[in-house]
């Protein structure tokens, strides 16, 4: 734990114990610097954390004061639910840092401790993480991005056991089909597939290709919306108009497209591609450029930094990354407070 977090915990304990109830005012910054032997910046970080906890507020030019009795009561009620576990397929790559930031900032601001683990989209790693949660018994709530959600998952029984033990679970993006009552926070992927295809059609494309991820339900839903829009527009859709890939394709082979694949694509006169996400779109830009084949119009998902730095820009639907994380955290806090929650899917930024 950082020094400022340690100081914040000490002060929070004193506040809850009523130490400052007579004056309602915390010691000055100078007094706290002297007491703890730290810099003013460290003290200010501690005070900021206490503000996030909801136990103090500041009056400019006057000082820092203990929050109302109602606010303190709310914090005390939540103190029984201290540990929230987050399981994400990835943490430091692509759009995941923004999602995790939204979750952690909201939860820590509500007085919860957060433990984060990465499954790298691997079922066995996911199982080990869940078994650790069972063994330690220190998880009061779980926010999880499922692993390979479009495939049968042997870990579903572990999630069901957590539910039986009263541990609330919020899924990110999508849940396993076996967990029909799961609370999910995600994007409206089916509608996103429709929007992406429609934008290409409206721009004049008449031969559209789809490139989707096969081992998560997001990929299936984006494909479903894409297929519906293309067929309803009267353009038709054949098996050869869609290519699928898995996590292993990306990890093991870097998802390189061979020259034969790229050239055969060009021969079929596709004038538009709907890509599963910006990672796929950048691979298409890279490999088409490598083999000297003209790049058709691209529609993608997530509007990520990866897409913004592509040497050839393409259109990408905006993912509400941090907003999604905040929403997942708020639903978790509501469930811990005994309130019933429901799934919610956000619209894409167009």
Image (cartoon, helix red, strand yellow):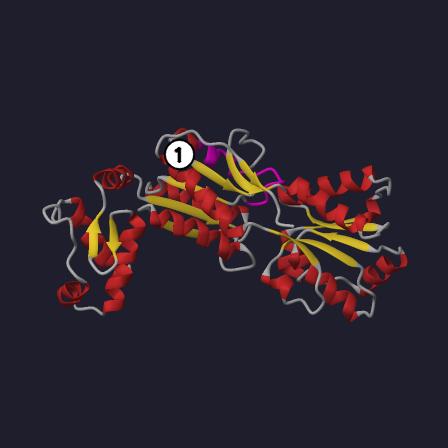
Please identify the quarter of the rendering in which residue 29 is found: bottom left
User: Where residue 275 sits: x, y (%)?
Assistant: 71, 53
Residue at left offset 54%, top offset 46%: 123
**Is 152 contained in the magenta span?**
yes
Q: Could you classify mark 1 by the number of other residues whose Cα lies within 10 Å: few (under 14), some (14-19), or many (20 or more)?
A: some
Whether residue 14 appears in this view of the structure is yes
Residue at left offset 51%, top offset 39%: 155
Residue at left offset 29%, top offset 39%: 78
Q: Between residue 262 and residue 79, name the one nearer to us.
A: 79
Which residue is at the far left?
22
Task: Report the magenta residues as a range.
Answer: 147-162
How many tags in the picture? 1
Using residue 143 as the reference point, say whether residue 203 is left or right of it.
right
For the N terminus, the image quarter is bottom left
Q: Between residue 315 and residue 273, name the one nearer to us.
A: 315
User: Where residue 327 sits: x, y (%)?
Assistant: 47, 43
**Is 256 contained in the magenta span?**
no
Please identify the quarter of the rendering in which residue 331 is found: top left
User: Where residue 220 sits: x, y (%)?
Assistant: 68, 41
Secondary structure category for the residue under label 1: helix
Using residue 153 as the reference point, say whether residue 337 is left or right of it.
left
The residue under label 1 is: 335
Whether residue 174 appears in this view of the structure is no
Question: Is 79 placed above or below 250 here?
Answer: above
Using residue 108 as the reference point, say whether residue 312 is left or right of it.
right
Using residue 41 as the reference point, say whether residue 244 is left or right of it.
right
Residue at left offset 72%, top offset 39%: 224
Q: Between residue 198 and residue 260, name the one nearer to us.
A: 198
Q: Between residue 270 and residue 138, name the one nearer to us.
A: 270
């Amino acid at each position: 734990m950082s020094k400022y977090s340690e100081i914040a915990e000490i002060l929070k304990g004193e506040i809850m114990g009523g130490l400052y109830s007579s004056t309602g005012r915390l010691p000055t910054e100078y007094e706290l610097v002297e007491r703890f032997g730290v810099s003013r910046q460290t003290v200010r970080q501690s005070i900021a954390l206490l503000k996030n906890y909801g136990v103090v507020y500041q009056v400019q030019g006057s000082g820092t004061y203990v929050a109302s009795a109602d606010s303190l009561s709310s914090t005390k009620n939540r103190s029984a639910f201290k540990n929230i576990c987050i399981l994400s397929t990835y943490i430091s790559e692509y759009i995941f840092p923004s999602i995790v930031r939204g979750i952690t900032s909201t939860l820590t601001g509500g007085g919860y401790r957060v433990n984060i683990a990465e499954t790298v989209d691997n079922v066995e790693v996911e199982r080990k993480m869940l078994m650790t949660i069972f063994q330690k018994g220190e998880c009061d709530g779980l926010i999880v991005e499922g692993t390979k959600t479009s495939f049968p998952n042997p870990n579903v029984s572990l999630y069901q056991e957590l539910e039986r033990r009263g541990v609330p679970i919020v899924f990110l993006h999508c849940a396993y089909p076996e967990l029909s009552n799961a609370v999910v926070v995600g994007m409206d992927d089916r509608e996103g597939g429709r929007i992406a295809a429609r934008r290409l059609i409206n721009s004049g494309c008449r031969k559209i290709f789809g490139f989707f991820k096969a081992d998560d339900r997001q990929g299936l839903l984006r494909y479903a919306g894409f297929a519906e829009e293309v067929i309803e527009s009267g353009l038709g859709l054949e098996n050869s108009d869609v290519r699928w890939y898995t996590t292993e394709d990306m990890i093991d082979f870097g998802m390189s497209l061979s020259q034969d694949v790229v050239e055969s694509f060009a021969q079929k006169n596709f004038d538009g591609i709907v890509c599963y996400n910006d990672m796929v779109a950048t691979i298409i830009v890279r490999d088409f450029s490598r083999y000297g084949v003209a790049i058709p119009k691209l529609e993608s998902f997530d509007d990520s930094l990866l897409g913004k730095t592509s040497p050839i820009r393409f259109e990408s639907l905006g993912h509400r990354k941090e907003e999604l994380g905040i929403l997942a955290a708020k639903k978790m806090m509501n469930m811990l407070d005994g309130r019933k929650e429901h799934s919610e899917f956000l619209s894409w930024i167009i």
